[in-house]
């Protein structure tokens, strides 16, 4: 269809458009017209991707000098593939029309079978910094890629889809973790490079001489191996500096690396729990090794030149060298940010590493922590327009503080539903009136574990198909499942549905997902018990009958990722583990430097993940689902008020502070009403619009009034 969005005609490759899609395109057009940045929140499954592409393509065609590229960043390969399909569909649709000089479209009446698709996806690799073009006007980049590291025009729109976690991505991009294993392999790599250099001295001495001359002249490396793991954001005062003389020669550089790795290995044996500023760390480092920041900051660049010179292209060698790369990244960052309070060096024990041998230092780690996400985000601000979009961006003001940018538009867009197809419920107590909570002090309470088991069993009896349960950690999941097993809860559940469990083994988890979907297809349904922040929670969609119910278990659960869900139970709120040494340092920084209290940030982080999980319930206008938040702390306005408006609008006072019995009654009534005959076409003019219906100016005004919510 042809849609007029604020006096701009564009093509939309579907027969119907949602009112929220029109509002989304209207807001995005405003952002591009003003050459500003924006934050747009719209529920998952509402068709954000095609809206972004529709506006971008017409801008590329109509205003090529003002807007030259779309850089689309997202988290997973399936999301990129979906965007690619949508783009191809849109470009095919454009071939059926001719754009006239006045900006209107004329139908060509060309048979679809004669249309050639002149686009090809060359490749999408999440771990690669050399990203490939889909066509001349659209690029796909993974979110973890530093956009500034690629030579792109600044006259571009950079879109971060699923951007609810972008601050953590920026933090991780500029942080490095070293373990005893990494340091040991890094030291072995230094010896490997020394042997390789010795071989080259005997047979290719001219190559080594040429490398040295190139460094003296300041010539860049023509890299063939992108082994560098860290896309550096270099402070401007260091941009024009060249590699210092004491590491220009290969032998000197390898000796430099050897001293550094040996120092780090020795320090890991001494420190159990400590935190240091970079200046303090550098002072101690110089005292023991005489290594200076000016030398350290060029470690990564010098290593890249060396690997190119030695022609190390073997996959196994490159795989091992990544440990040495991590060490050089560590050195480079502390060399660049010598006096910065935005970084901290944290020495701690990694509780996830089980120590089976007598050496107590095997689970020691040191992490160079970036504390300010705006460092990695700053280069991206040089692009003309930036869009952060997701189904979960409330409160948006927090992203402005964390990323240090001012959006022109911060808007939440409501979904217009053809019927009341979502049912959020807060279950705060069991049938015995014992309060449900997963606070640390009450997590092992047998009465709470029993009540959670009763809640799941009750929902299994009334849920048509798939049920998804999420726990905060593998250890807690194993503990609760053990208790349920001894109490006979699991046996009772299996009378109604099969149970599948996510494990830390990715192959086992994949098998569980395949069999879970098979069980749902057979009509009996199934229960998938998973862990927040795991594979299932981060990147798996469950459509239609695959996810009738999702359960959030514990206040520390962090993410539930479900598509077309009919029922969702959430046991608790996904608070982060505040005793983690790295997280404590970051909380202190947020409080002291950004004036963000620990309580506010913890609630913000927990509720954005909760909303992201719950958002997987609704994937289209035809979907319906129940979201059960099983923790009495959800009743606090400081918590549920941070959920997106499209959830809180449906969370009535009658759906709060319910017992298990009352929740089951509400869910049964909800599913009964959803079981009635329903045709999406019956909601035309309300929840969907055809080309004729969307032309009316008064209708467009009503749509904007109904769907736009400033936050």
Image: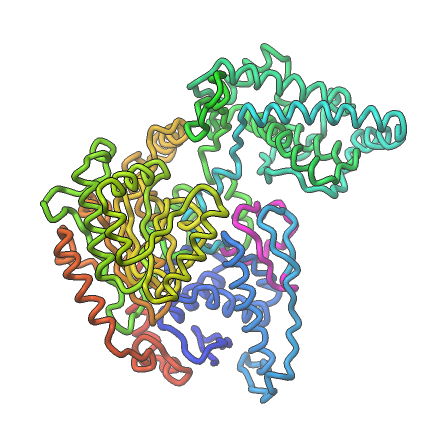
Q: Is 479 left, or right, of 285 in this rendering?
A: left
Residue at position x 20%, y 66% in the image: 670
Q: Position of residue 607 (x, y in %)?
A: 30, 47
Q: Position of residue 219 (x, y in %)?
A: 78, 37
**On-image quarter of the C terminus:** bottom left
Please say whether residue 158 is one of the residues in the magenta stretch: yes
Q: Is 639 left, or right, of 144 in this rendering?
A: left
Q: Is 122 left, or right, of 620 in this rendering?
A: right
Q: Is 359 drawn above or below residue 618 in the view shown?
A: above
Q: Position of residue 303 (x, y in %)?
A: 70, 31
Residue at position x 56%, y 57% in the image: 71
Please say whether residue 215 is one of the residues in the magenta stretch: no
Is residue 94 visible to the viewer in this orientation of the structure? yes
Q: Is 559 drawn above or below residue 122 in the view shown?
A: above
Q: Is 622 drawn above or below residue 532 in the view shown?
A: below
Q: Position of residue 118 (x, y in %)?
A: 66, 72
Most extreme residue toward the left, as rendered?
433
Give the residues in magenta: 134-159
Residue at position x 18%, y 43% in the image: 436
Q: What colouring does the structure picture have? A: rainbow
């Amino acid at each position: 269809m042809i849609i007029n969005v604020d006096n701009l005609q564009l093509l939309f490759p579907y027969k119907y458009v949602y009112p929220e899609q029109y509002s989304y395109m209207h807001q995005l057009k405003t952002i591009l017209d003003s050459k500003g940045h924006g934050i747009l929140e719209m529920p998952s499954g509402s068709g954000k991707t095609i809206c972004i592409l529709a506006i971008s393509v017409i801008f590329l065609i109509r205003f090529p000098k003002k807007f030259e590229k779309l850089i689309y960043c997202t988290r997973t390969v399936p999301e990129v593939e979906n965007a690619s399909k949508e783009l191809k569909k849109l470009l095919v649709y454009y071939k059926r029309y001719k754009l006239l000089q006045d900006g209107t479209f004329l139908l060509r009446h060309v048979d679809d079978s004669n249309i050639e698709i002149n686009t090809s996806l060359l490749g999408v690799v999440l771990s690669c910094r050399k990203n490939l073009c889909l066509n001349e006007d659209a690029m796909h980049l993974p979110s973890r890629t530093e956009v500034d590291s690629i030579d792109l025009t600044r006259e571009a729109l950079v879109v971060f889809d699923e951007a609810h976690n972008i601050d953590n991505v920026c933090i991780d991009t500029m942080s490095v973790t070293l373990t005893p294993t990494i340091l040991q392999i890094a030291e072995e790599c230094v010896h490997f490079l020394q042997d390789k250099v010795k071989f080259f001295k005997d047979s290719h001495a001219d190559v080594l001489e040429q490398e040295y001359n190139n460094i003296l002249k300041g010539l860049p490396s023509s890299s063939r191996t992108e082994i560098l793991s860290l896309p550096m954001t270099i402070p401007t005062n260091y941009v024009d500096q060249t590699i210092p003389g004491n590491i220009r020669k290969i032998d000197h550089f390898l000796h430099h690396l050897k001293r550094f790795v040996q120092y780090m290995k020795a320090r890991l044996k001494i420190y159990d729990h400590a935190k240091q500023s970079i200046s303090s760390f550098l002072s101690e480092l110089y005292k023991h090794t005489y290594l200076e920041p000016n030398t350290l900051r060029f470690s990564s660049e010098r290593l890249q030149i060396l690997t190119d010179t030695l022609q190390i292209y073997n996959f196994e060698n490159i795989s091992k060298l990544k440990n040495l790369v991590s060490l050089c990244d560590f050195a480079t960052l502390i060399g660049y940010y010598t006096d910065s309070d935005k970084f901290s060096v944290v020495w701690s024990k990694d509780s996830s590493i089980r120590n089976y041998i007598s050496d107590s230092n095997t689970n020691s780690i040191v992490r160079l922590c970036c504390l300010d996400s705006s460092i990695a985000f700053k280069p991206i601000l040089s692009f003309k327009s930036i869009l952060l979009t997701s189904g979960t961006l409330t409160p948006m003001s927090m992203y402005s503080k964390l990323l240090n940018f001012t959006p022109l538009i911060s808007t939440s867009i409501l979904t217009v539903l053809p019927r009341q197809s979502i049912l959020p419920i807060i279950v705060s107590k069991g049938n015995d009136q014992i309060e449900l909570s997963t606070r640390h002090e009450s997590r092992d309470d047998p009465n709470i574990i029993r009540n959670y088991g009763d809640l799941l069993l009750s929902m299994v009896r009334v849920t048509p198909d798939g049920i998804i349960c999420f726990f905060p950690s593998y250890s807690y999941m194993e503990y609760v499942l053990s208790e349920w097993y001894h109490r006979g809860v699991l046996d009772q559940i299996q009378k109604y549905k099969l149970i599948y469990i996510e494990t830390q083994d990715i192959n086992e988890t994949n098998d569980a997902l395949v069999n879970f979907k098979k069980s749902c297809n057979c009509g009996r349904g199934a229960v998938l018990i998973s862990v927040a922040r795991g594979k299932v929670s981060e990147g798996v969609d469950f459509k239609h009958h695959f996810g009738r119910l999702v359960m959030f278990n514990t206040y520390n659960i962090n993410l539930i990722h479900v598509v077309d869900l009919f029922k969702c139970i959430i046991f608790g709120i996904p608070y982060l583990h505040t005793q983690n040494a790295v997280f404590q340092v970051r909380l202190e920084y947020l409080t002291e430097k950004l004036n963000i209290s620990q309580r506010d940030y913890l609630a913000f982080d927990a509720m954005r993940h909760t909303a992201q999980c719950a958002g997987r319930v609704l994937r289209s206008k035809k979907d319906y689902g129940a979201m059960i938040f099983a923790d009495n702390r959800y009743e606090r306005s400081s918590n549920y008020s941070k959920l997106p408006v499209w959830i809180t609008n449906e969370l009535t006072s009658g759906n709060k502070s319910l017992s298990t019995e009352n929740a089951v009654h509400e869910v049964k009534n909800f599913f009964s009403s959803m079981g009635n005959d329903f045709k999406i076409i019956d909601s035309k003019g309300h929840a969907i619009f055809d080309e004729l219906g969307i032309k009316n100016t008064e209708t467009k005004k009503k749509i904007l009034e109904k769907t736009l919510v400033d936050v």
